[in-house]
Image: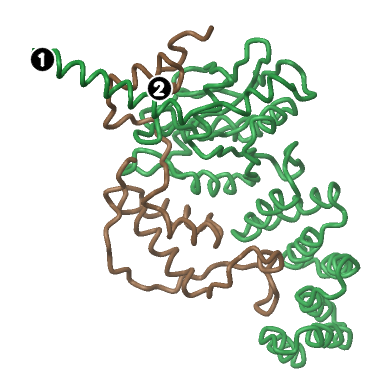
Chain colours: A brown, B green
Amino acid sequence: MLKSKFMRCLLVAFTALAVSLPGQAGMVGTAQLQDSLLSVDLGSIAAKRDWIEQQLVLGGVEAMDAETRVASMTDAQVIKIHQRIDEAPAGGADALVIVILILVITELMGYTDIVPNWPASE
Amino acid sequence: MKFANRRARAITCTLVLLAFLGGCATSPQTRSLLDNPPDIPPRAELTEVPFFPQQEYHCGPASLASIISYRGTAVEPEQIVPLIYVPELKGSLQAEVIAATRQFELLPVQLDGTLESLLREIAAGNPVFVLQNLGLDLVPVWHYEVVVGYDFDQRIMIMRSGLKPRVTRSFALFEKTWQRAGHWALAIVPADSIPQTVSASAYLEAVIGLEQVGRINTAHRAYTTALRRWPENLVAHSGLGNSAYALGEFAEAESAYRAALQIDPEKADVWNNLAYALAQQGRHEAAIGAINRALELDPVNQNYKDSYHELSHWQ
């Protein structure tokens, strides 16, 4: 697994990010109506959003982009990412630490497909 | 002598390791599909899906640019990079791929993870965004690509992938590389469309996501789309109501909430929201009646009590 080296423990400055919810404050949002969202208080979600934004910036993302990206995540995604960001796959096709011999053989035997169209399909 | 023994040991270890690793990979779905082909054309290929060769590690942006362009907004991978790519990871996270589609007013709908559904989506004209592990569980090689076709005679899947506009992979091998990526697949569709194989809840999860991040107009359209297919769906009616409310369409919101309550008259949350829609139209007595109904159903709910208080003092 590609180690996400920038995942270090950090003291995150707690800023109450306003999470934009449509409609009146007293209304019940569609996600809650569906009972799909854990009942987590907004403050804790805001802190998680802040932390994810920080991690993206630490990972080399421009600050303004990081802000936009976190704003496009739902609360449910924020919770999930916060729990598992250091385990998540990052699609990039970067082959690290390949045991060349093994993978050449698995490629020939048809268990892997690191080199496209090789060997040619029967 | 020593060397020969060492080499023999190394070869044996490698073979044992391979047997172990190989044994863990089978293709049951392929077998089943070939034995009982589904009722779709024997081959299909979405040739109009554009191809963007990926820059280093940018398979996410290249693949997403393909699908977004196909859906009507011409974009280049370079525009997608700042939306999903994490330099330190040399790749893009699945959650960010999903989030990015919302920025283009598109719905990211997760598929059910079966190969059959993937094929059905292609047959229906929907390219599918997939994650693959082209390596092994122990040494993963994560890669995004766009599935654009299949062929039952050749038993291949067809993808836009990496530097090649047309990569083919056998059903069996595709199944293995996809299985190692958790069978993750997204159909990315506009708000007037529903992917071929998804359930109401999978579709609505995507719509709710759009609504949550403030894409209200698009969410509103998508709830309407959902109701055409699933007219008895409580969440769809409620979502239509909430999105209409957010757009200031209070009469429409009221009508949607009432439709939801026809389906489940005891959904107190909807009574609560109906009360607000009525108040916004100046019908205060009716509003109090509605919030009282919510309180009858759930007397200890603090939110409803607060709503009652707010509605009683409505100007």
As helix, strand or loop, the secondary structure at mark 2 comes to: loop
The type of residue carrying mark 1 is Phe
A71 vs B310, left or right, is left
Q: Nearer the viewer, mark 2 or mark 1?
A: 1
Between B196 and B284, the residue placed more toward the observer is B196
- Spatial CA distance of label 2 from label 1 is 32 Å
Q: What count of labels does the image hold?
A: 2
Residue corresponding to mark 1: B3
Task: Say which chain tag 2 marks.
Answer: A
The quadrant of the picture occupied by the C terminus of chain A is top right
Question: Residue at left 85%, top 70%?
Answer: B254
Question: Residue at left 84%, top 84%?
Answer: B293
Between A47 and B284, the residue placed more toward the observer is A47
Question: Residue at left 56%, top 26%?
Answer: B27
Question: Residue at left 39%, top 58%?
Answer: A53
The image shows residue B18 at horizontal and vertical percentages of: 36, 24
- Residue A97 shows which numbered tag? none
As helix, strand or loop, the secondary structure at mark 1 comes to: helix
In the image, residue B81 above or below residue B292: above
The quadrant of the picture occupied by the N terminus of chain A is top left
The image shows residue B131 at horizontal and vertical percentages of: 51, 35
Extreme-left residue of the structure: B2
The type of residue carrying mark 2 is Ile
B7 vs B243, left or right, is left
User: How many other residues sit within 10 Å of disc 2, few (<14), some (14-19) or many (≥20)?
Assistant: many
- Residue A114 shows which numbered tag? 2
In the image, residue B52 above or below residue A41: above
Task: Say which chain tag 1 marks.
Answer: B
